[in-house]
Amino acid sequence: MTLPGATRRREMLSKVPEITLWFWIIKILCTTVGESFADWINMTLGVGLELTSVLFTVVLAAVLIWQLSLRRYVPFVYWLTVVVVSVTGTLYTDILTDDLGVPLAVSTTVFAVILAVVFGIWWRSQRTLSIHSITTTPRELFYWLAILVTFALGTAAGDWILELTGWSPGISVLLPAGLIVAVTVGWRLGASPVLSFWLAYILTRPLGANLGDWMGFPTDQGGLGIGVGWTSIIFLAAILATVVYLSVTRADVLETAPREKRIGDPRRERLMLGYLGAVAVLTVGTLTWAAAQPHDVAAASEEGPAVAATLAPGHSATEKFPASDVAGFRTITQDTLDLVTSGDQAGAVARVKDLERAWDAAQSTLQPLDDTGWNVLDGQIDHVLTAVRASTPDATAQADALNTLLASLQ
């Protein structure tokens, strides 16, 4: 005879997938979609950061209610929740950085503290942080809250690293990938499985985001030039195919309640904790060295030789582009100029990032329409980004660059 409580406990456990290679593959796919899909909705479709954030917060609430209402692990619903959490966490970080002008160093620190608080309350309440202990609704709520914060933290930390180092998207992929390998080695050698899991989970966020940027960014900015729209479609298709495979094979389904892992060797865990600490010190040293090297603040977006382009007499740079796109670029440029004129440098830096993202997102659509016009505007936008993000801003130079761009966007 099976007690009702035991049945409920087994069903709750079956809602969480087994941590296999498939788990990490689909997690990285979801993370990449979080970066590219958020940019596509916000910029390419012109929905705007605030409205996009509100929409995805509502969607997150609905999907999370669906996930919590289930009695067993359903791959489609579980991974849909992860995708929506990924997008939402990215948007929350973008709001802090772009709308509120919070420095990435501050937002990274804040999210790290919030995550520590979540883990602290979770541990104090449940006495475990293991993914295999998700047997009740309160534990599942802690689990999803921690995941949301890890996405926000990973986004802020990843962007901060890019800001510090000026690395291109392709190069920036190597750091989180290397750190994940280091964490995996530590886990294999006896590091705490729970600590290793959450470290790897956090690191997959910048890995997936940088991978998405690398695929979506133009080739002259260190990317593959696929565009954020196609990148989102490719990874969403890969996620769907993987979910279908897992639904059919049940390769990640916990058929029975897994026994808690036996207690590891405390001495080896302490040794591996020292190893992970050494990896952290080495990482900080590498970032400090990279930050000290000469580079532009926006290197990932402005690197590469300038393209010389000249318009034919009587023609404008925007005549072949959709009016709605041009109007969006003009609005952002005018907003940035107004902020520069009013002396709000932090606001101008935040707003000009919207211009950078919108322009990058639209490249795959606009450049085929008029390569010359696109290159003219691209050069002017690069001048704007350089002027606004200069370490010693010159209001006159910023205004000149912005007014030149505005004239071309008529």
Image (cartoon, rainbow, N blue to C red):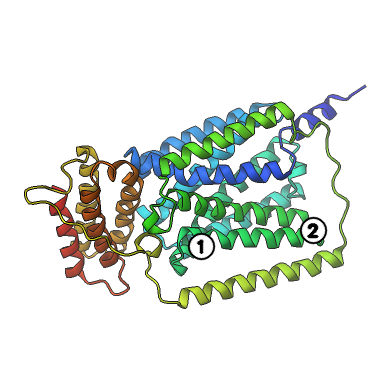
Q: Secondary structure at mark 1?
A: helix
The percent coordinates of residue 86 (x first, y second) are: 53, 44
Tell me if 163 is positioned left or right of 262 in this view.
Answer: left
Tell me if 223 is positioned left or right of 43 in this view.
Answer: right
Find disc 1 in the rendering and name its residue: 171
The numbered mark, 1 or 2, whose residue comes first in the sequence reads 1
Local crowd size for mark 2, using a 10 Å CA cut-off: few (<14), some (14–19), many (≥20): few
Based on the displayed image, in which of its 4 quarters is residue 243 positioned?
Answer: top right
Can residue 12 be seen here? The reply is: yes
Which residue appears farthest toward the top when viewing the image? 1
Kind of residue indicated by mark 2: Arg
Q: Residue at x 51, y 62 (%)?
A: 171
The N terminus, quarter of image: top right
The percent coordinates of residue 198 (x first, y second) are: 67, 53
Kind of residue indicated by mark 1: Ile
Distance (Cα) linking label 1 and label 2? 27 Å
The percent coordinates of residue 7 (x first, y second) are: 82, 26
Find disc 2 in the rendering and name its residue: 188
Q: Residue at x 15, y 64 (%)?
A: 400
Can you tell which of label 1 and label 2 is closer to the viewer?
Answer: 1
Which residue appears farthest toward the right when viewing the image? 1
Q: Secondary structure at mark 2?
A: helix
Q: Residue at x 22, y 65 (%)?
A: 343
The percent coordinates of residue 290 (x first, y second) are: 50, 73
Q: Across the whole image, how many numbered discs are drawn on residues?
A: 2
